Amino acid sequence: MKKYIIILVGIILIAGIAGFYFYKRTPEVSYKTAKIERGTIVSTVAATGNLSAVTTVQVGTQVSGTIQKLYVDFNSKVKKGQAIAEIDPSLFNASVEQSQGNYLSAEANLQKAKVALTDADRTFNRNKKLLSDGIISQGDYDVAETALQSAKAGVKAAEGSVAQTRGSLMQSKTNLRYSVIRSPVDGVVISRAIDVGQTVAASFSTPTLFTIAQDLTKMQIEVSVDEADISRIKLHQKASFTVDSYPEQTFRGEVIQIRSAPIITQNVVTYVVVVSVDNSDLKLKPGMTANVSIEVAKKGDVLKLPPAALRFKPKSKGDDTKAATTGDRTGASAPRPAGGVVPSGGGSGAPGKGKERGLQVYLLKEGRPVASPVKTGIANNSSIELVESGLKEGDEVIIEQIGGDAKKKAGTGGSPMGARF
């Protein structure tokens, strides 16, 4: 029995020693690569905004009163001039009747003044003849002349009164006409702020009763673009967007306006860009949140490099020494593209301009990474354009190191976390 125990202990001891040396050994270094492909690269600027009708009209009232009738509701289609609501017209009818009476009275007074003028004119002419014949005195003649001038003034006053009462009558009729609220445009009612029996007051400002979207088949999105990207936005650029209601469908649009007025929120400067949208199928509704991508540059039949290849840097000392003998500045870390994706100057769409010096990728030769300098162009989240390099389609570039001294995958991050203490 003791013999078996000694043998078992020996086996466990040998296995422990073997396991210790096996796990203590330096792991082998391997690399993950990706092929350089040829294709199309589309560079975009992402932004968020809300859908709205191109023309939205707020309908109010110019007179005060109680809502007596409603002819439309939410989503009602209306025509220009169509009655959509009515205010109780009782007071307005009474005002029209009163103004009509005042106007008729003023006209009667005018006729009376004209009769008086005719009589005064006849008396004046008769006294003038009598004065020349010496029958009446100069005083009688002066009295007749004064009466004539007074009669003329009376006619003028009566005419003014007629004009005043006529204006009052027109105002009363206008107010009566305004008691029927009509649609100013063809469109769809998207908001109603009143109910039957509600009193509206137009004393100080015109209250909004309805909101009418003139044409929902043509809509627009007002998106906020960061100041860093606004220089890349141009008129008539194509745009695509999605909404939460149709997550699997992509809608199309076009940039029609770039507003110069800045919007500053907590020291962040943005600019409003307006994107026109065709909504012929009426799927989109005002107020929907749209996630917009504006196409700022597009190139076809170019070499495409994975962004992770520019972020890769060999981690083991031996690899760095080998790479330094064959490449240019391979011991230094490749500059990280701006924003983690687009290299410096990559969004301008002009290849070879403003590129950051020292960009390089690594190829695997004889089991070791070898640096190759590159110049990049436009980029998106998945690809970067190769403008100048010694690479060709089908070449494999290193995007990740596995094993060796690397404690962090190079393809999934940028620089290492830092020196170990």
Image (tube, grey):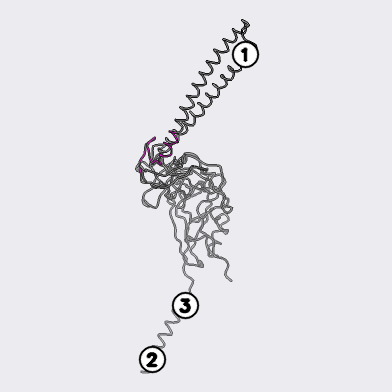
Image quadrant where residue 96 sits: top left
Q: Is residue 133 left or right of residue 381?
A: right
- Disc nearest the viewer among 1 and 3: 1
N-term-proximal mark, 2 vs 1 = 2
Q: Magenta span covers which residues?
A: 75-97
| Secondary structure at numbered mark 1 | helix
C-alpha gap between disc 2 and disc 1 = 163 Å
- Disc nearest the viewer among 2 and 1: 1
Q: Amino acid at mark 3?
A: Tyr
Tell me how many marks there are.
Answer: 3
Q: Is residue 79 magenta?
A: yes
Q: Nearer the viewer, residue 190 or 21?
A: 190
Outermost residue to the right:
138
Q: Mark 3 — residue?
A: 21
Q: Residue at x 60, y 15 (%)?
A: 144
Q: Mark 2 — residue?
A: 5
N-term-proximal mark, 1 vs 3 = 3
Q: Residue at x 56, y 13 (%)?
A: 123
Q: Mark 1 — residue?
A: 140
User: If the image is split into quadrants, where does the C terminus sit?
Assistant: bottom right
N-term-proximal mark, 3 vs 2 = 2
Image quadrant where residue 155 sits: top right
